[in-house]
Image (cartoon, rainbow, N blue to C red):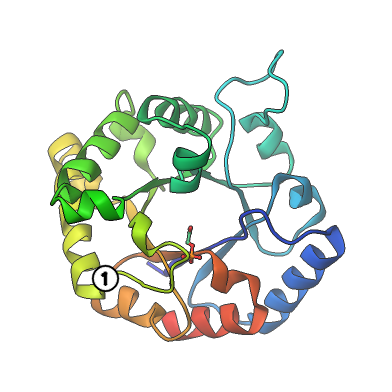
């Protein structure tokens, strides 16, 4: 399976013009590159204006619509042309109070609409220091996927993003990340059996750049990458994708 490389632009760039320019440069640089599937996740307001690469949203609301000021529902995201939705990113959990329970509701809303969720899990520095990493991953996966059926898992994407590695320039060593990949597969196997668990794509995210991207795919055997900061510089992102394939 070709690696899935997801660009999470977070709350950037500031204008539609810059967003269009960044996408145009990335598209041009990756023209003819067949070895990877690239998904761009810009802020909601740019989704309808961008095209030419697969798109994803960075968040969603669990209801389809109604009196929920400020929220964006999955049918709206689908209508904007997106195929993917990031769910449970650690910045949402940390700054916007998302819990395992709300993450689970969002996840199910994405599946119901037939879009592909990218479920993010990962431990904080403090949890890692107190040897809670495996417990945290197991809890996050089990609670988020509570009620999600094996039949819903075709194309499902999970991202291992150690919180301490996000945006710090301090990526998780590929050997340690590889161990967590095996642990995540074990948890999925306990819930769904090995055949179904094996069909879930697991990505690594956290300070990925053009120098380390290959090691997570080729050595640690992740099925792809979730890229923040490095996806905002077209040259760096193009190099990152090319070295990962
Ligand atoms: P980073 O962010 O690549 O800037 O560390 C990754 C993410 O938050 O998805």
Looking at this view, is 83 or 64 the one in front? 64
At 37% from the left and 64% from the top, the residue drawn is 165
Against 185, residue 98 (above or below) is: above
Looking at this view, is 159 or 163 the one in front? 163
Label 1 Cα crowd, 10 Å radius (few <14 / some 14-19 / many 20+): some
Looking at this view, is 208 or 113 the one in front? 208
Where residue 126 appears, as percent x and y from the top left, is 25, 51
Where residue 145 appears, as percent x and y from the top left, is 32, 32
Where residue 63 appears, as percent x and y from the top left, is 59, 20
Q: Which residue is mark 1?
A: 221
- Quarter-of-image position of residue 216: bottom left
At 23% from the left and 42% from the top, the residue drawn is 136
**Is residue 203 in sight in this rendering?**
no
Q: Residue furthest right?
A: 17
Against 178, residue 33 (above or below) is: below
Screen quadrant of the N terminus: bottom left
- Quarter-of-image position of residue 164: bottom left
Q: Residue furthest top?
A: 67
Image-based side of 229 in relation to 78, left or right: left
- Quarter-of-image position of residue 34: bottom right
How many marks overall?
A: 1
At 74% from the left and 78% from the top, the residue drawn is 25
**Is residue 239 in sight in this rendering?**
yes
At 35% from the left and 71% from the top, the residue drawn is 171
Q: Secondary structure at mark 1?
A: loop
Screen quadrant of the C terminus: bottom left
């Amino acid at each position: 399976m070709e690696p899935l490389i997801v660009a999470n632009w977070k709350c950037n760039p500031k204008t539609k013009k810059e967003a269009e320019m960044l996408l145009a440069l990335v598209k041009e640089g990756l023209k003819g590159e067949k070895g990877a599937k690239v998904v761009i996740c810009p802020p909601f307001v740019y989704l309808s204006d961008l095209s030419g690469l697969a798109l994803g949203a960075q968040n969603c609301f669990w209801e389809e619509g109604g009196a929920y000021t400020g929220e964006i529902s999955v049918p709206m995201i689908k209508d904007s042309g997106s195929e993917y939705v990031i769910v449970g990113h650690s910045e949402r959990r940390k700054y916007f109070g998302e819990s395992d329970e709300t993450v689970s509701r969002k996840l199910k809303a994405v599946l119901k609409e037939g879009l592909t969720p990218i479920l993010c899990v990962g431990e904080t520095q403090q949890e890692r220091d107190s040897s809670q990493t495996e417990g945290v991953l197991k809890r996050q996966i089990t609670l988020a996927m509570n009620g999600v059926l094996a039949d819903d898992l075709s194309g499902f994407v999970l991202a291992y993003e150690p919180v301490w590695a996000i945006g710090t320039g301090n990526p998780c060593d590929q050997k340690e990340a590889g161990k967590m990949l095996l642990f995540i597969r074990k948890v999925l196997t306990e819930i769904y059996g090995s055949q179904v668990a094996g069909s879930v794509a697991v990505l690594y995210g956290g300070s990925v750049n053009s120098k380390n991207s290959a090691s997570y795919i080729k050595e640690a055997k992740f099925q792809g990458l979730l890229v923040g900061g490095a996806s905002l510089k077209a040259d760096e992102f193009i190099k990152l994708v090319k070295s990962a394939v």
